[in-house]
């Protein structure tokens, strides 16, 4: 009779030699081949555009208020008008996705603090008229006190308008959004700041755009930090931020935002560099919003991104 080593010793020697079991990745399916969760029915053009335009409007109002306080009248007027245009287009995109304008009005019948959609509707309902009044007074030169009050009101509501869509997305069951619920508002704030800075660099004179140049650099750094923090928290779900359409958009966003910030730093002396940097920042911000949206859809469509993180959190996955 031949000697046989215990099975445990054999497995240990295999691990020591670097041998690994070739196990294919498990495929998780729900009934009838459907995903575990239902992907949002939002149209990318409407809702991702709504995310981008709302951020541009909200951050633009903050920049406009700062410009007015520091005597940069052209920059202030420019950002007030651009914020009004952005929030108008943002509301149009939302209404187009809803299907009928009456549905937006219906959301204003009740204020539900626990619902990001309800709070966001009221934010838009208050911010829109304030942004409109601020822009109208700036263009006509009439009612300066009313214009100053409207500018202040829009600046107070602006940060919430720029970031509440992140809370709205994170409040869903979509893994790529819900898993990054802590980092997503910071990412949207940085993206909105980059967009507003880019708009200011494109439209305002160079002698008044110093705040926009500084904000562009800070936004580029904050955007990169927020994306990396979100990917660390998401774990395997972060694959949706790196692969497919979302990966291409977010890689493009990093290049455009970083390049735009670099060009913005040169914009004081070179008007062409300022315009090019501004356009790059606007495009980078849009790519960020559309990329995050695409990552959410990808994570909802693959059951593994729903099942595996839940099993890992419950300690049901093997350590090797």
Image (spheres, grey):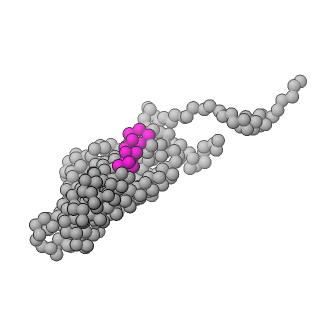
Is 93 within the magenta?
no
Image x and y of residue 240, in percent: 44, 43
The residue under the point 24% across, 62% down is 206
Taking the image as drawn, is residue 164 in sight? no
Residue 320, compared with residue 231, is above or below; it is above
Question: What kind of secondary structure does the magenta stretch mostly adopt?
Answer: helix
Residue 293, compared with residue 122, is above or below; it is above
Left of 248 or right of it: where is 80? Answer: left
As drawn, which residue projects farthest toward the bottom? 145
Left of 26 or right of it: where is 4? Answer: right
Image x and y of residue 174, in percent: 42, 47
Residue 292, compared with residue 302, is above or below; it is below
Image x and y of residue 153, in percent: 24, 69
The C terminus lies in quadrant? top right
The residue under the point 37% across, 45% down is 252
Magenta region, residue range: 243-256
The part of the image, by quadrant, that contains residue 108 is: bottom left
Viewer-nearest residue: 134 or 259: 259
Left of 9 or right of it: where is 289? Answer: left
As drawn, which residue projects farthest toward the front? 269
Image x and y of residue 93, in percent: 24, 49
Viewer-nearest residue: 282 or 24: 282
Viewer-nearest residue: 125 or 239: 239
């Amino acid at each position: 009779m031949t000697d046989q080593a215990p099975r445990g010793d054999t497995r240990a020697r295999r691990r020591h030699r670097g041998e690994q079991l070739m196990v294919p990745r498990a495929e998780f399916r729900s009934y009838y081949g459907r995903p575990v969760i239902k992907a949002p029915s939002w149209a990318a053009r409407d809702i991702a555009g709504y995310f981008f335009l709302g951020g541009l409007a909200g951050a633009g109002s903050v920049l406009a208020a700062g410009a007015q306080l520091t005597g940069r009248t052209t920059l202030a007027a420019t950002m007030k008008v651009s914020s009004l245009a952005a929030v108008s287009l943002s509301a149009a995109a939302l209404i187009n996705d809803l299907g009928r304008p009456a549905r937006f009005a219906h959301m204003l019948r009740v204020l539900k603090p626990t619902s990001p959609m309800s709070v966001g509707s009221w934010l838009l309902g208050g911010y829109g008229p304030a942004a409109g009044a601020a822009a109208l007074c700036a263009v006509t030169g009439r009612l300066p006190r009313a214009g100053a009050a409207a500018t202040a009101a829009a600046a107070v509501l602006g940060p919430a308008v720029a970031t509440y869509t992140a809370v709205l997305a994170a409040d869903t069951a979509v893994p790529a959004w819900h898993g990054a619920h802590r980092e997503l508002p910071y990412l949207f704030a940085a993206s909105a700041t980059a967009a507003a800075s880019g708009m200011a660099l494109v439209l305002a004179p160079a002698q008044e755009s110093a705040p926009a140049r500084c904000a562009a650099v800070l936004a580029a750094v904050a955007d990169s930090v927020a994306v990396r923090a979100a990917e660390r928290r998401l774990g395997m779900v972060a694959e949706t931020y790196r692969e497919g359409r979302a990966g291409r958009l977010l890689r493009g966003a990093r290049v455009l935002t970083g390049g735009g910030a670099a060009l913005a730093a040169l914009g004081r002396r070179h008007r062409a560099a300022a315009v090019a940097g501004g356009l790059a920042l606007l495009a980078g911000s849009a790519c960020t919003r559309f990329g995050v949206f695409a990552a959410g859809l990808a994570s909802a469509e693959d059951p593994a991104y729903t099942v595996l993180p839940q099993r890992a959190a419950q300690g049901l996955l093997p350590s090797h």
